[in-house]
Amino acid sequence: MSLIAAILIIISAFMHAGWNFISQRRSPSLAFFFVTAVCAAFTISPILFIHRDVLRLLPTAVWGLVLATGVAQAIYFFGLAGAYRRGDISLAYPLARALPVLLVASVSLLLGNSGDIGRLGLFGMVLITAGCIILPLPNFQELRPQNYQDAVILMALVAAIGTTGYTLLDDQALRQMRAAIPLENSQITLLFISLQTSSTALMLGLATLFSPAERRQLRQIGQNRSLLLTGLLTGVIIMATYGLVLAAMAYVTNVSYVAAFRQLSIPIGAVLGLTLQQEPRYPPKLIGIGIVSIGLVLVGIG
């Protein structure tokens, strides 16, 4: 993985941990993330106007990928909101972030891209996942399958499936866009972000519209100025965070490296929980942070 990709992902990791920390404290819902998506789409919408002439050059397949990534993003936010409403960030966040590492790598291998993933990098991905699994445990005696069979774990798994989906879809969409339109990589990245955020806002809006509970949440957000401003600010941060990730995809041989190295946000999120929220400093949590950090180094040099 190149130095440029590493720098972009490190910055995005700090931002990602930050907006998740903010969201978890607000007991998020699909309606909350719909507000964030609308804000993000509105903020970056001028890009669609600036590059309106090249939109007609996009292949039909790219438009299909844009719609599909909106669905995957909605699944991700549904799982994330559900996990955060039911548990602590020190449990939900590591699992939601860890599982996509091996899921993305597994799909890449199934698609025949095994040659792009080195053994050292793959071992690092395994370490990241192992570290994230033990990180939320109060003690090592609790490492039993039945302790992972609750609503928080299931919702974190849903979030992980969504993450895996949009990571692979976005990578393919960007590759096709780079081959189809005469723009620089940074311009293509910004254009795709504007398309992706619009698609995400649309899918989250439909999910909110068809759910009476989410419609009530949306009305409450509109009536709470502080919550509304938090949602709007979070939307801008989410857009900027993933924009850095998309830019990094142009500097790696396989998207699995991006999916893995992004997990730097896990120890960052853990530190936020340990310090700002005074969460317990269990030995498995501290050891898990160490294992994840080692895995990140292996991914970076692998």
Image: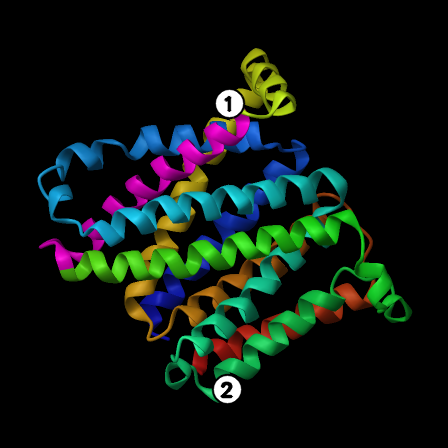
Does the magenta portion include 282? Answer: no
Residue at screen point 46% across, 27% down: 232
Does the magenta portion include 193? Answer: yes
Of the residues shown, which amino acid type is indicated by label 1? Leu
| Residue situated in front as seen by the camera: 155 or 6 | 155
Q: Position of residue 71 (x, y in %)?
A: 45, 44
Sequence-first disc among 2 and 1: 2
Q: Which is in the foreground here, disc 2 or disc 1?
A: 2
Does the rendering let one see residue 189?
no
Residue tagged 2:
120
Q: Quadrant of residue 268?
A: bottom right
User: Which numbered dot is residue 229?
Assistant: 1
Q: Quadrant of residue 19?
A: top right
Q: Is residue 45 above or below residue 156?
A: above
Question: Is residue 53 left or right of 6 when viewed as pictured?
Answer: left
Q: Under tag 1, what secondary structure?
A: helix
User: Which numbered dot is residue 202?
Assistant: none
Of the residues shown, which amino acid type is indicated by label 2? Leu
Q: Residues within 10 Å of mark 2 (few under 14, many from 20)?
A: some
Q: Residues within 10 Å of mark 1 (few under 14, many from 20)?
A: some
Q: Is residue 119 above or below residue 215?
A: below
Q: Under tag 2, what secondary structure?
A: helix
Residue at screen point 55% across, 79% down: 124
Q: Position of residue 92 (x, y in %)?
A: 69, 51
Q: Quadrant of the N terminus?
A: bottom left
Residue at screen point 76% across, 59% down: 136
| Residue situated in front as seen by the camera: 162 or 237 | 162
Q: Residue furthest top?
A: 223
Q: Which residues are magenta?
A: 180-208
| Residue situated in front as seen by the camera: 75 or 220 | 75
